Image (cartoon, rainbow, N blue to C red):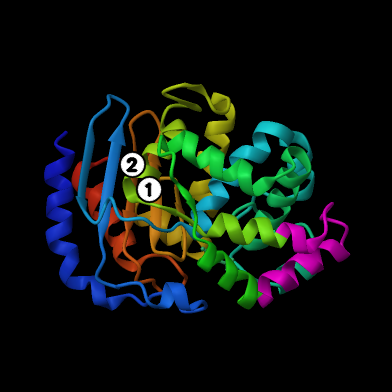
Amino acid sequence: MLYQDILDRIHAEIVPTLPQGRVADYIPQLACVDERKFGMALYDVDGHFASVGDADERFSIQSISKAFTLTQAMRTADEQLWQRVGREPSGSSFNSLVQLEYENGIPRNPFINAGALVVTDIVLSQLGDAKVALRDFARRLSGAEDVDYDLTVAGSEARLGYRNAALAYFLKSFGNLENHPDAVLDAYFHHCSLAMSCRELAKSFMYLARHGANSDGEVITPSQAKSINSLMLTCGTYDAVGAFAYSVGLPAKSGVGGGIVAVMPGRFSLCVWAPGLDNRGNSLAGSQALERFATWTGESIF
Ligand code: GLN
């Protein structure tokens, strides 16, 4: 399969549509990102690589980090985790408060903000310094030693993250955080601020395409890799997950920085970045690019 040709064709078709999306504006650092940016990068299990556009430019990975923290929590506390977080699509916005009230402080899944806060709490309890742990994990997976947090983004998230603060304190009131909410929020905001490129993210997610292993050994078990891919398929793109599965048919995790990573188990890992979002918070052009990719290559899990 000539992935490079396909990415080039997608690039040519998508670039004119880029201004249609709307960049996230809840913090100034995301509001000023150029909406005309577009990149894609793909690694396959045979070692092939293809990329197009701004594939080497780092961006704010935001909720894509939730897949990394989930992986870390499953490595250390797989049993405990599922008593505190569900595994169902939320059908609500990713930062909903009402659902948490109705469901007694048990978040629907690890990819909505409330779920990720519980996962972060577990990582904090298990690994001590959750900030260093996640940064080092991302460095190891990507092979890029200088991957780091964008401290200006992390600072803004903390200063303006009233809704996340509400979620964390609400979780604490239900007894579903072990650590102080401020400590959990601090780690969570840093995780969201991790800056990585399409190439680095595509490489990092290869363990999910390779049944849990990357080039230097097992990251998680094959069964855990299957579970994370299943959760990405059913919960990875917020409350647009049904439409996304319908049109793309690949497990994927998105972030409000405009990145989406999609995985074809046994075949490849693919990352797209286009900062303009749709009204659910997924990259608009990124979703369209993945739909074209799946249709033109015929590669989907179905
Ligand atoms: N920092 C964002 C938040 O916590 C991340 C959300 C996202 O990417 N969906 O609201």
Image quadrant of ligand 1 equals: bottom right
Q: Where does label 1 land, which residue?
A: 249
Range drawn in magenta: 162-184
The residue lying toward the viewer, choosing from 287 and 182, is 182
Q: Is residue 236 left or right of residue 178?
A: left
Q: Is residue 104 left or right of residue 268?
A: right
- Specify the quadrant of the image occupied by residue 23: bottom left
> Residue 79: where, in percent of width, then height?
76, 35
> Residue 135: where, in percent of width, then height?
55, 45
Q: Is residue 168 above or below residue 117?
A: below
CB within 8 Å, label 2 to label 1:
yes
For the image, the number of numbered tags is 2
Say which element carries label 2: loop
Secondary structure mostly taken by the magenta-highlighted segment of the chain = helix
> Residue 218: where, in percent of width, then height?
53, 22
Identify the residue at horizontal 32%, vertical 54% (top origin).
272
Reading the chain from its start, which is encountered first: label 2 or label 1? 1
* Residue 70 in view in this figure: no
Identify the residue at horizontal 57%, vertical 64% (top origin).
154
* Residue 297 in view in this figure: yes
Q: Quadrant of the C terminus?
A: top left
Q: Residues within 10 Å of mark 2 (few under 14, many from 20)?
A: some
Say which element carries label 1: loop
Q: Where does label 2 land, which residue?
A: 300
| Amino acid type indicated by mark 2 | Ser
Q: Is residue 136 above or below residue 33?
A: above
